[in-house]
Image: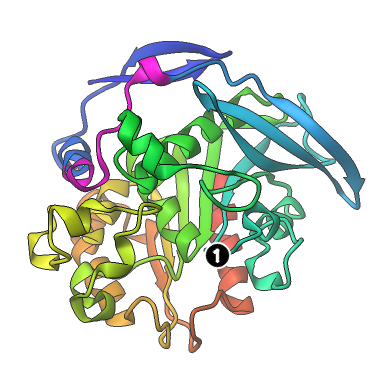
Amino acid sequence: MARWFLVAGMAVVSVVPLPAADAPDRAAIRQKMELVMGPMPDARRRVPLDPKVESEEKLEGYVRRKVTFAVEKGDRVPAWLLIPHTATAQTKAPAMLCLHQTISIGKDEPVGLGKQDSKAQALHLVKRGYVCLAPDYPSFGEYKYDFAAAFQRGDHASGTMKAIWNNMRAVDYLQTLPEVDGERIGVIGHSLGGHNAMFTAAFDERLQVIVSSCGFCSFAKYYKGNLKGWTSDRYMPRIASVYNNDPQKMPFDFSDVVISFAPRAFLAVAPEKDHNFDVSGVRDVMAAAEPVYKKLGVPEKLQALYPDAGHDFPAEARQRAYEFIDRYLKK
C-alpha cells in the first residue's frame, strides 16, 4: 500500500506494510467515508507549505506565533503556533493539533483568547511541554472560505473533507518544525473540533493519540436519527442530497471511524447530559470498537469518560485527558 507524505516541502511516496490480519481494513473504512465526504485529494494537490510568521509574542513559558501556511494552490490557513521554552532542536517535544469548536473566533479559543478556559486545550498543553498548533476551520476566525465556489470547482465535496485535508497539511507543517518530534503527534478537539479530530485521524495515521470531547455519537442516536445538523456545506451536504438524512442509508458510522484508529490511542469524553450527542450513542460506538482493540492486544488504548455534565469539557475530564496524552506521547 503506497502512502504519500511531505518531506521539506516535497511530495514523497513511501511504501508501508499492509495491515496485520487482525487490524481493521482502514482503506475500506476510508472509502465508505469518502462516499459521504467526497474523495481525498491526491498528492498532486499538495503545494510547498511556504510557512509565514505574521507575529510573535514571548509569554510565560512559551512563545505564541501567528502563522499561515499553504495547503493547496491559492489557499492559506491561519493558525496559532505555541512553542514551549523547553522545546528546542536538541530537545524535541511532542506536538498536538488543537481543533476548535463551532465558535466565531475559531483558533483563538484553544490558545486561551476566548472566554472559556475549558476550551483552551492548546494553552493547557503547551504548559505541559507540547508544541501546539491551532488552525482555523474553514469559514471561522480569520479563514474566509467559499464552500460553494470550491464545490463548483471540484476542489472538495464537503467542508469536512476540506478540513481533513487542511489538518493533514498542518501535520506536515508540524513535522517540519525543528522543535517537534515528528513521530509523537496527537490531536484533540471539542464538539466540532472533536469530530474534526476523529475524521482527520481516520485518514492520517501519523496522529498517535486522538482525544474527542463531545464530538460524536452513532448517527442513529444523533437527535433521534435526524441528521440535518450534519448537512451544511461546512460539514457533509451529501448526507441530505444523497442519503436523505437517513442513518440507515449512511455508508459509515462513528463505530467505523473509531475502529480505524486501532491500535492507536483514543479517548472519548462524552458527558451524560450532552444535548448534542446522545451518550448512549457514544457507548454503542465504543462497544463496537472494543473487540477490535482487544483482539490487537491493546484494550487500554481505547478509553471513554462519562462526566456528569452537559456539552462541556469539565476540569476533571480535561486532567485525565491530558494524562492520557502524556502516557502515549511523552518519553
Query: Where does label 1 land, which residue?
Result: 321
Q: Nearer the viewer, residue 112 or 39?
A: 39
Look at the image and give the residue range highlighted in magenta.
32-45
Q: Give the vertical position of 253 relative to 167 (above or below).
A: below
The image shows residue 49 at horizontal and vertical percentages of 59, 21
Q: Is 226 drawn above or below residue 258 in the view shown?
A: below
**83 and 112: which one is in front?**
112
Q: Answer with left or right where residue 251 lies relative to residue 267.
A: left
- Residue 153's spot in the image, x, y percent? 34, 29
Which of the 4 image quarters holds residue 203?
Answer: top left
Task: Name the spot of residue 111 as percent of width and height, x first.
Answer: 72, 55
Q: Is residue 181 visible?
A: yes
Q: Is 216 above or below relative to 208?
A: below
Describe residue 132's horizontal placement relative to residue 55 as left or right: left
- State which quarter of the image contains the N terminus: top left
The image quarter containing residue 194 is bottom left
Number of on-image labels: 1
Q: Secondary structure at mark 1?
A: helix
Q: Residue at x 71, y 71 (%)?
A: 117
